[in-house]
Image (cartoon, helix red, strand yellow):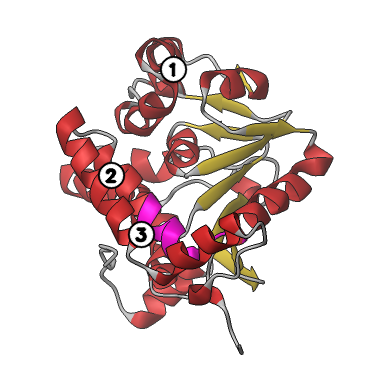
Amino acid sequence: MVETVRTPGTASEVERKRALVRRESADGIVRLTLTRGDRYNPLSRDMITGLQAELDALAEDVTARVVVLAAEGRGFCAGHDMAEMRAHTDDPVWQNTLFAECNNLMTTLTRIPQPVIARVHGIATAAGCQLVSMCDLAVAADTARFALPGVNIGVFCSTPAVGVVRSVGRKRAMEMLLTGTPIDAATALDWGLVNRVVPDEHLDTEVDELARAILAHSAPVIANGKRAFYAQIDQPLDTAYAVAADAMVRDLSAVDAAEGIDAFLEKRTARWPSTRSGD
């Protein structure tokens, strides 16, 4: 079962916040779009609540196979809402709640069963860069820029670093953190922060091709594999292998493995029993 935490609030409050994230679905692909493009889609508490609500709902949606996280406007996400944070610099309870909610959002991206692809254009800075790092995959426009610039305003990007360092490694993350200097899309690709970089006009096509490559495979196998990947990645070697072996036993014991192996031996395309409909 996917572990999720519901954000408190009345149904109307949650719906108002969910309006900050537009949801569109087609052929098993769900696109979640941040809609505050006029402000570079800051991760205000309302935005975090809205995105959390959408991800929690997706965790239970068996028709959703792949999630694309996108954004409106000139950039992907500029991080936390600076005006909102400045208004609460004397309120440690509010600050702790903000980061607890944001941390939960970031880990939820790894907990839901569907692969999540970040569609990145423009800037992705601070918690926006963190958001990219916590998605399973990321495709960036060649004009995208990434940064952990908190040091420039007197707030070290400590929480964004948690996700970014797991993508790019210690030395590269520390360079971003200590200098605040942005890196371009080509560097982000070389460092492992994103999977692919394409011209801006090809961004949607590339994201769609990647999503459809995932759709060709068994949904339960993908979900089990994603769960096992994150369960083992930070564990000691012996524990990691035990988690991975259990995941493979789960796969081999399910109906899709029998079909997949038979299809391989018979040199034909697999027809996954778990995802068939009407036959």
For the point 66% across and 56% down, the residue is 267
Quadrant of the image containing the N terminus: bottom left
Along the viewing direction, whichever of 277 and 226 lies nearer the viewer: 277
Q: Between residues 263 and 131, which one lies in front from this camera angle?
A: 263
**Residue at numbered disc 2:** 244
Any magenta on residue 219? yes
Instruction: Name the residue at the front extreme.
Output: 266
Report x, y in % for residue 201.
83, 42
Q: Are marks 3 and 2 in contact (CB under 8 Å)?
A: no
- Label 1 secondary element: helix
How far apart marks 1 and 2 lie (CA) works out to 42 Å
Number of residues whose C-alpha sits closer than 10 Å to that of mark 1, classed few (under 14), some (14–19) or many (20 or more): some
Residue 266's tag is none
Q: Residue furthest bottom?
A: 278
Q: Which mark is residue 252?
A: 3
Disc 1 or 2, which lies upstream in sequence? 1
Mark toward the start of the polypeptide (3 vs 1)? 1
Residue 190, position in %: x, y?
A: 58, 18
- Callout 3 secondary element: helix
Where is residue 149 drawn, in percent x and y?
Answer: 46, 22
Q: Which residues are magenta?
A: 216-225
User: Tag 2: residue type?
Assistant: Ala
CA separation in Å, label 3 and label 1: 51 Å
